Image (cartoon, grey):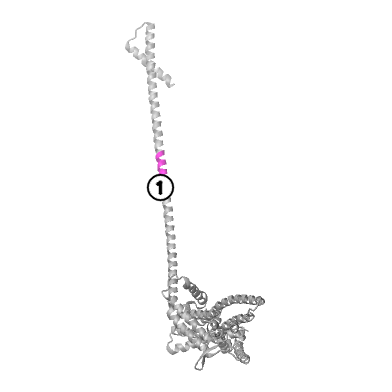
Amino acid sequence: MILIENMLAATDPMQHVIPHTLFHVGPMAFTNHMLMLLVAAALLAVGFPLMARNYPMVPSGVRNLVESLMVFIRNEVAKPSLHEHTDRFMPFIWTVFFFILVNNLLGLVPLDPLSVLILGRGHIVGPATAGMSVTAGLALVSFFVIHVAGIREQIAHQRHHGRSGGSAVLMGIVMYFHGLVPAIPGILGVILFVPFLGLELLGAAVKPFALCIRLFANMLAGHVVLASLLVLAPAIHNIADLGLSVPVILGCAALSCLELFVAFLQAYIFTFLTCMFIGAAVSPQH
Amino acid sequence: MRTLTKMCAPVFLVGLCVQSQALAQAEHGSANPVQVDPWQAGFAIAVFVLLLIILSSFAFKPILGALQKREDFIRDSLEQAKKDRESAEQRLKDYEQKLNEARAEATAIVDEGRRDAEVVRKKIADEAEKDATAMVERAKREIGIATETAVKEVFAMSARLATDAASRIIRKELNPADHERLVAESIEELDKLSLN
């Protein structure tokens, strides 16, 4: 009975989405979300190099499926924002998209009930992107890439105009932050520069929050809704229990389809926004 | 309004995190999904960066290279196809122009031939008409001469016969010189009559 309750999330819907400690490495806890990150990374680190080996001119089968996603991200998501810089950022953009997508999809696979059945212990696996620590980490990476790319572009611009060494770096950083503030002509521009810079810096800090919260909240909500619905499915003791169990299970199946869509959608949105922010940082004129 | 939202959002989120953490710890004493664990976040960053390095080196660069190569190939093929099409269109235009010129030339040759033939035909017809007219004239002349000769012979014979008859009547024998003189006078009179 406990096994079934574990499998159906009958005790607490939140138990399926929060990180659970598997073991400790010194003072640090190694959680099931971290394990899922490793599994997703391993799948990608093995799968993509295998796919890239002897890459044909015209791909077929799984290569074709994955390539269609890669081409979509490159041509429809990245290129409109990054323009001529697109291919420079594509390894990062593709890694962001596929890492989030695989984590989202792994969160949908019912691995936890399987671990209960096989190992007799639950919460070994879990949806990593439904944990805010993971999405915050990914958002921080995006934040770092966005601003470093913007500053590097400004440094390259300064070097192109004859500056070199530390002067180019310093001027690049100054010009990057100066470029954040919209140009206002006249004395008003001078007066409003500092408050506007403050607002823009605040905006730059909010962007990774937006990325982090959006992904985390959507994935968490989907899993919690599914788990909450499963709480309604009672263990079948007699024919009357079927009246409740069958609609609940059918509803869960329908919601899982929606979650499958949300998994792709959230990976797309995170990637799209990251591309947009990088594009705004490296080519403010666009 | 947008700026105000931007300003308030971090404050709100930090507040939400703190409140949720406090609530979760108070109610369940378990981990809070809204709580950010720096160790977990750092682990996620490390895994991501490691994955990025592996995929960039062993997967995405070769795939990106293949995609760029394919794009270049498609672009080159399209450009080549465009050039070939333009060249073919130009050739078609040239051939059509040449064909039209050849057709015009052929038409001109045929027209010239027709004109020449017409001239030759007309010339031949004219010559034939001329020859025919000349032949008719000649024939008329010959007929006239023959007629005249015949008439003269008839008159001469008639005059001779008449003279013979008259001499027989008057029983007087004409000498050959008178006879010839009478015949010539008769013929002259006949000519005068015929001219009148």
Q: Position of residue A123 (x, y in %)?
A: 55, 85
Q: In terms of depth relative to the viewer, which is nearer, B101 or A102?
A: A102
Label 1: few (<14), some (14–19) or many (≥20) C-alpha neighbours in 10 Å? few
* A239 left or right of B75 in image: right
Task: Find disc 1 in the rendering and name its residue.
Answer: B109
- Image: B40 above or below A257: below
Which segment did they paint magenta?
B108-121
Q: Verify whether residue B116 appears in magenta.
A: yes
Q: In terms of depth relative to the viewer, which is nearer, A220 or B195?
A: A220
Q: Position of residue B2 (x, y in %)?
A: 61, 83
User: At 42% from the left edge and 75% from the top edge, which residue is drawn?
Assistant: A53
Q: Residue furthest left?
A: B176
- Image: B86 above or below B35: above
Name which quarter of the figure residue A185 lies in.
bottom right
Name which quarter of the figure residue B20 lies in.
bottom right
Q: Which amino acid lies under the numbered mark 1 shown in the image of this protein?
A: Ile
Q: Position of residue A284 (x, y in %)?
A: 52, 81
The local secondary structure at tag 1 comes to helix
Q: In terms of depth relative to the viewer, which is nearer, A208 or B83?
A: A208
Q: Chain of mark 1?
A: B
Asked if residue A178 can be seen in this view, the reply is: no
Q: In terms of depth relative to the viewer, which is nearer, B10 or B85?
A: B10
* B192 left or right of A260 in image: left
Query: In which quadrant is the N terminus of chain A drawn?
Result: bottom right
Q: Position of residue A108 (x, y in %)?
A: 56, 79
